[in-house]
Image (cartoon, rainbow, N blue to C red):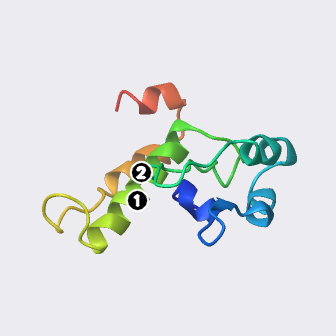
């Protein structure tokens, strides 16, 4: 799973890794991505990933990307605050509830 846009960039040529982009995204999306200019030295951005079960972007998939990123940064000592801060497992239980998504947002 990709986390940062920079993972899609060849560090030697400072251009898109075309093969990786084409393997990762649908053809129409890859074409759009490859048309975007790269500016050396730009800030990293999270690369949102779709939900593995449905193949679609969702609030849940965005939450998981953020949670996984926080966990990785915490392990590496990059996150602010205590290294004791771990994602709360209650969130997985909330997302797995058998109810409409709009209800989960109120829980």
Please provide percent x and percent y for residue 49. 60, 51
Q: Which residue is mark 2?
A: 66
Camera sees residue 87 = yes
Of residues 56 and 89, the one drawn nearer to the viewer in this rendering: 56
Quarter occupied by the C terminus: top left
Please provide percent x and percent y for residue 106. 36, 27
| Residue shown at the point (74%, 58%) measured from the top left | 21
Q: Going by the picture, which residue comes out furthest to the left?
A: 82
Q: In the shown orientation, is residue 34 left or right of residue 72? A: right
Q: Which mark is residue 91?
A: none
Q: Which residue is mark 1?
A: 69
Mark 2 closeness class: few <14, some 14–19, many ≥20 residues within 10 Å: some
Q: Secondary structure at mark 2?
A: helix
How many numbered dots are placed on residues in this image? 2
Of residues 103 and 25, the one drawn nearer to the viewer in this rendering: 25
Please provide percent x and percent y for residue 96. 50, 48
Q: In the shown orientation, is residue 104 left or right of residue 23? A: left
In this view, 75 is above or below 61? below
| Residue shown at the point (80%, 65%) measured from the top left | 19
Image quadrant in which you'd find residue 82 = bottom left
Q: Secondary structure at mark 1?
A: helix
Mark 1 closeness class: few <14, some 14–19, many ≥20 residues within 10 Å: some
| Residue shown at the point (58%, 64%) measured from the top left | 7
Camera sees residue 97 = no
Q: CA distance from mark 2 to mark 1?
A: 5 Å
Quarter occupied by the N terminus: bottom right
Of residues 24 and 56, the one drawn nearer to the viewer in this rendering: 24
In this view, 35 is above or below 64? above
Of residues 47 and 6, the one drawn nearer to the viewer in this rendering: 6
Question: Are the residues flagged by discs 2 and 1 in contact, CB closer than 8 Å?
Answer: yes
Please provide percent x and percent y for residue 100. 54, 29
């Amino acid at each position: 799973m990709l986390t940062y846009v920079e993972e899609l960039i060849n560090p030697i040529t400072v251009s898109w890794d075309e093969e990786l982009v084409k393997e990762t995204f649908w053809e129409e999306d890859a074409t759009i991505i490859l048309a975007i200019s790269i500016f050396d030295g730009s800030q990293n951005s999270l690369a949102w990933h779709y939900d593995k079960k449905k193949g679609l972007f969702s609030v849940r998939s965005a939450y998981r990307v953020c949670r996984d990123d926080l966990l990785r940064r915490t392990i590496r000592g990059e996150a602010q605050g205590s290294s004791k801060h771990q994602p709360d497992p209650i969130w997985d239980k909330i997302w797995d509830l058998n109810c409409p998504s709009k209800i989960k947002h109120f829980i």
